[in-house]
Amino acid sequence: MMFSQVFPPRAKVLSLTALLFMFLPSALWALDLGDKVQVHGFLTQGYLDTNGNNFLSDTKEGLWDFREIGANINAQLTDKFRLGGQALYCDFGDSTNGNLRLDWLVAEYHFTDPFGLRLGKIKMPMGLYNMERDSDFLRPLIFLPQSIYDETRRDSWQAHWGGEMYGNLLLGGWGDVDYQLFGGKINYDCDSLATLAATEIVNRYNNTYSLGLTTDDLTRENDYVYGAALFLNPALEGLRGGLTFLSLYDETRIHATQVSTLRVKSKVVASLEYSWQKFSAAAEYCETDRKQEQFCVTTLDGRSRAWYLLLSYAPIEDLTLSLLYDEYYRLIKNRHEPVGDRNPYPWRKDLAAILRYDITENWTFKAEWHTIDGTAFYMSYFNPEGAERYWQYGALKLTFNF
């Protein structure tokens, strides 16, 4: 039964460790390197349980391998020049196997308010929250709305190696606008979800056509990614709007054999967020025009549609209660067209209730429950017995940040 299993020994150790840390003074975690250098970090431990379908790992029996550890440093060397970076350790069951990676690494020169440059591994602006995706304490949810911030495509949308031009433009009495223009390439790790999805394709074709291909030498590479973002900060306090765009091209190979290609012609997200006293609301709408080929056969060509509405209420300062409705269709024109036998329900309608409680300045607890219709973003790799249309999942997460 969901959340009713007896805690395994490892869970007890993690729980006791969390309680011990909670009573340690925050000063033990502070690192004073002067006014020009700041060091921050976070640790999270979560629990995920699903019924009906596995979600990104084997989760129907409950998953305790759901944690992240991050540490970042920012050095403001002059008024205009900044260096910064973050290392991130992720353990999410079989989909990551506990890997340490460079999350971002940036050299930034801020010439004037209207113009600056960044070089390195840079977070990509996509919607309101993609650049803050690894900063768990900045948002009420454990999982961002999947229709736009799809976890199975996280590697594709997270960060790129390249450059970015950015700035802030004043609009007189109307407020101001932040802009970003970026371009470069995405580096996919060999054990990333993107590579795992490609492995799933090879296994499926091997089983169907007896191709005899091995996935040991499978590589997924990005030829290019580029995009732009505008974020409007109007004079009305608490209101923010955004419009983001990106395009990319990926290719997967096993030596000389082309497994698949994916061209995202355009991914456009329109965003709106408003906060007033104890209430806040966020809504985003996205259309993605893309074409995918697998072994030189077109398997997807068209636009998807996604949108969500998130409503939040804070009855007291440290407690936030939220409701989310999130909807996605793989193809706008053929919304209910099945993807063969492996995904007969290529849409996702998600209704969720979410709780966030800030225990102390450094500790945050979150809980959420989702009931879902559809299996878009479904990975048959974790569901060899097939898909169920209606399914649910619950998640708990404890975060320490400093």
Image (tube, rainbow, N blue to C red):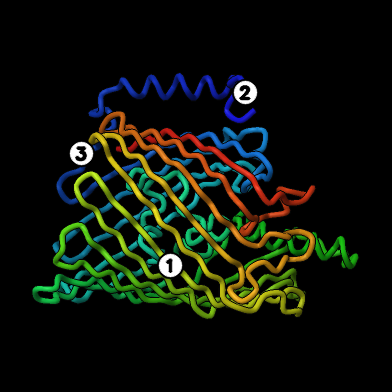
| Residue at 17 percent of width and 71 percent of height | 176
Residue reaching furthest to the left: 173
Mark 2, residues whose alpha carbon is within 10 Å: few (<14), some, or many (≥20)? few
- Residue at which label 3 appears: 32
| Residue at 55 percent of width and 77 percent of height | 289
Residue 21 as seen in the image, left or right of residue 397: left
Between residues 201 and 104, which one lies in front from this camera angle?
Answer: 201
Q: What's the distance in space between the residues labelled 1 and 2, CA to CA?
A: 38 Å
Between residues 155 and 54, which one lies in front from this camera angle?
Answer: 54
Could you tell me the amino acid type at mark 2? Answer: Gln
Q: What's the distance in space between the residues labelled 2 and 3, CA to CA?
A: 43 Å
Secondary structure under badge 1?
strand
Q: Quadrant of the N terminus?
A: top right
Mark 3, residues whose alpha carbon is within 10 Å: few (<14), some, or many (≥20)? few
Between residues 101 and 279, which one lies in front from this camera angle?
Answer: 279
| Residue at 61 percent of width and 58 percent of height | 377
Q: Is residue 177 above or below residue 88?
A: below
- Residue at which label 1 appears: 285
Residue 353 as seen in the image, left or right of residue 215: left
Q: Is residue 119 above or below residue 345?
A: below
Q: Where in the figure is residue 149, as x and y percent of width and height?
A: 48, 58
Q: What's the distance in space between the residues labelled 3 and 1, CA to CA?
A: 42 Å
| Front of the two marks 1 and 2 | 1
Mark 1, residues whose alpha carbon is within 10 Å: few (<14), some, or many (≥20)? many
Disc on the earlier residue, 2 or 3: 2
